[in-house]
Amino acid sequence: MISEFGAYALILALVLAVLQTVMATAGRIRRSPVLAGAAQGAAIASACLVALAFAALIFAFVTSDFSVANVANNSHTDKPMLYKVAGAWGSHEGSLVLWCLVMTGFGAALARASGLPFGLKTSAVGVQGALGSLFLAFAVFTSNPFARLDPAPFQGASLNPLLQDPALAFHPPLLYAGYVGFSVTFSLAVAALIEGRVDPAWGRWVRPWALASWVLLTIGITLGSFWAYYELGWGGWWFWDPVENASFMPWLAGAALLHSAVVTERRGALAGWTVFLALLAFTFSMLGAFLVRSGVLTSVHAFAVDPERGLMLLGILGVTAGAAFALFAWRAPKLTGGGLFAPISREGALVLNNLFLTAAAATVLLGTLYPLILQAATGATISVGPPYFALTFTPLMVVAFLILPAGPLLAWKRGDLKGAGQRLAVAAGLSLVCALLGWMAFEPRKAMAAGGIAIGAWLILGALAEVAERVRLFRVSLAEVGRRARALPLGAWGMMLAHAGLGLFVLGAVVETGFKVEAAAPLGIGGEVTAGRYSVRLDDVRIVEGPNYLAEQGHLTVIPTDGGPVRTVVAERRFFPAGGQTTTEVGLDFRGLDDVYVVLGERRSTPQAARAWTVRVYWNPWARLIFLGPLIMALGGVLSLLDRRLRIGVAGRKKAVERAA
Amino acid sequence: MRTAAIAFVFALLAGPVMAEPAAAPDQPLASASQEARAQTLFQDIRCVVCQHESIADSPAGIAADMRRLVREEIASGATDESIREDLVRRWGDYILFKPPVKAATWLLWFGPLLLVLGAGTAFIVLSFRKKPVTAPLSPDEERRLEELLHTEGVRPDPDATSSHD
């Protein structure tokens, strides 16, 4: 009954989304505040209904209602509660409802946002309604999450055990919030093209949405990467897998958008380009959805796929992106250019940032789609993997990172490169010292890694130098420095954290990739294997029973060879009877910035016919920074979002609520 | 759960027979430089039964076989290039994560560079074309500017001078 109610709510949400578009269009043409208000009401009601449908779906999962096909295919009575709930978005159908929920939720927030002019807001609500209609129709007509089974099975097929993990329970909602958040920037961009006006105010309205989406996407991707790191048991954290790339493209486009929106907001320049990026970010999100759900790619992340649905998604992508970019081609030349600027200026640096970020996104796109296109065109199969991206993507980023710290030190309009150089001289010198120290500290000595360390240090020190410059550190009294630091806008701190977080990530990625040590050996009880600075001893292996699995649980002791505290870790091999699958649970010993990563492999016999297990040990130096860096970047984004200058809409909304009350 | 437990124990006992044989841990090559070459090659070679993994990362049995094969070839004196050629002869270009540079992949390899160069050139050309026209002030205008600057209450445009926002 609840499921029928959910299905009904979803259909009603679709009807309301269509009404939202129609009323917003009519309201915009007739300049009728009544119709526009009704469209906003429909947006909010539509979001509430999708939320009800989603709640009904979660209810079906929590109560293990196997008469619902989606539940029967993806749940099991023995599954822990967290994964029963998470199962609601573990399948194609369920995750599509989540997608629609985020989309209509952002649509409702857009409808509630104040401070936007009538025309722009009404058009944006209409476009958002059209996007919502397309995806809700896709859910209702091709992927009904509430379809019944008759007869209902006694037990469900359970969720893929690889996905039964806390990081992965929260990874999709965050990732989707980021992906689909860009639908609002898309709607605002299309609305601006319809209205024919892109001014600094538009830049200011679009930036919080872009920033919020980018922050959520950053956290989502980081969680996903961390999951791959410890759940797949290969010790890697980024594989340039097509599905990872699918999430990375909107991230890169979103990062470019954030920076170009600043130029539009402050200087009124780059208006057309900012609109283009706002369209591009969500187009990449939809492309990602298509790649993951259509079956054109195979990946651990891909959903159980269906070419027919893929074709429909391709249709949605073609219609929305095609219409939006056609509108862009038609209207963009009419957008008036904003403030002029010299090539060497803050604007110029941000243009370079955008040049490299979009080129990087294009490289990822090329590397992801090229094998598909080549195979379709000529039948030849090629593989594009990490070595390709190391030769194309990485150099682009290196150049971008070298330029990055100079940007914030240049003035708007016309900058003083020599002055910026002088202010960064200390940071540059210290970065070279860091490179030298790194070169001497890590064995074996690698020039490339030392260069990478210099770049990471350069990003961090450059970010610090910028703040030091703004508070006049060492040039005025400490009290004055404190006063200046308190007076700095949150956005400035946000930028510093985001850039320093990027530097931390670079350091972690370089050191982990350059100096990780791997060792594997068949170990009997009491056996030891050594990887770099750490020895790992297998103390005991027990068979334990989990809620929905059985496991061989290895208890191991990590012993630093150069002294230091001895710790124990637990690594498991889990067998899930429901699906007949086996997963590994990695034992992680956090050692400062380093990880000692222990995998219990299959049981095997030693020549002496004793019981033995293959134990693989990785010493991953500075691996912590790989995941900490992006989280600090996201924190920087949050600080910028809290900046007063961006909170105009929020304050207005509060007032509106008070008025309504 | 009991039947499951029995199934599990059975699976443990029969595991190596039922599933693909458990790969023996790799025997690294005796020569450190040869082993380093092997490790670099592993990163480039795709595991043919996996989804998107190199044989360096994959736990699959066939990946272990391929690693052994590569090590044997290195030990017998084959060059990296000849090993790659052997693999491509057997499996096609698909086997290498680094696609060969040929007519069909020129766009793939040089697209990013062309994009940066093209867009960079466009930016430079545009930014020089849009150069603001600032004719020198006439003596009369200079005088008026002087007067204005001395009038109190005229604040300079903060954007024009501050290096920060």
Image: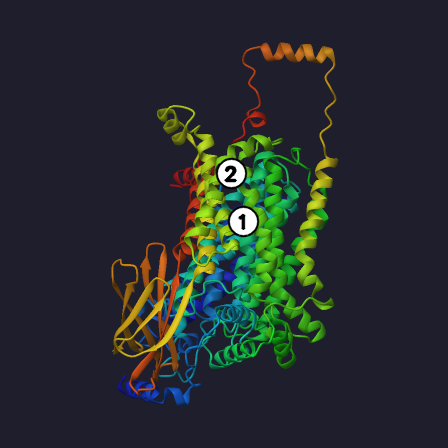
Percent across and percent down for residue A448 are 53, 54
Q: Is residue A112 positioned above or below A526 on the image?
A: above
Q: Quadrant of the N terminus of chain A?
A: bottom left
Alpha carbon distance from label 1 to label 2:
25 Å
Residue drawn at point x = 60 percent, y = 65 percent: A368
| Same chain letter for marks 1 and 2 | yes
Q: Nearer the viewer, residue A110 or B135?
A: B135
Q: Which residue is mark 2?
A: A115
Per the image, the residue denoted by label 1 is A255
The chain holding disc 1 is A
What is the basis of the colouring in this image?
rainbow
In this rendering, the answer to whether A232 lies above or below A488 is below
Up/down of A316 relative to A265, above or below: below
Q: Amino acid at mark 2?
A: Gly
Apparent side of residue A355 relative to residue A95 in the rendered image (left or right): right
Q: Nearer the viewer, residue B153 or A590?
A: A590
Q: Is residue A180 left or right of residue A119?
A: left
Q: Earlier in the sequence, mark 1 or mark 2?
A: 2
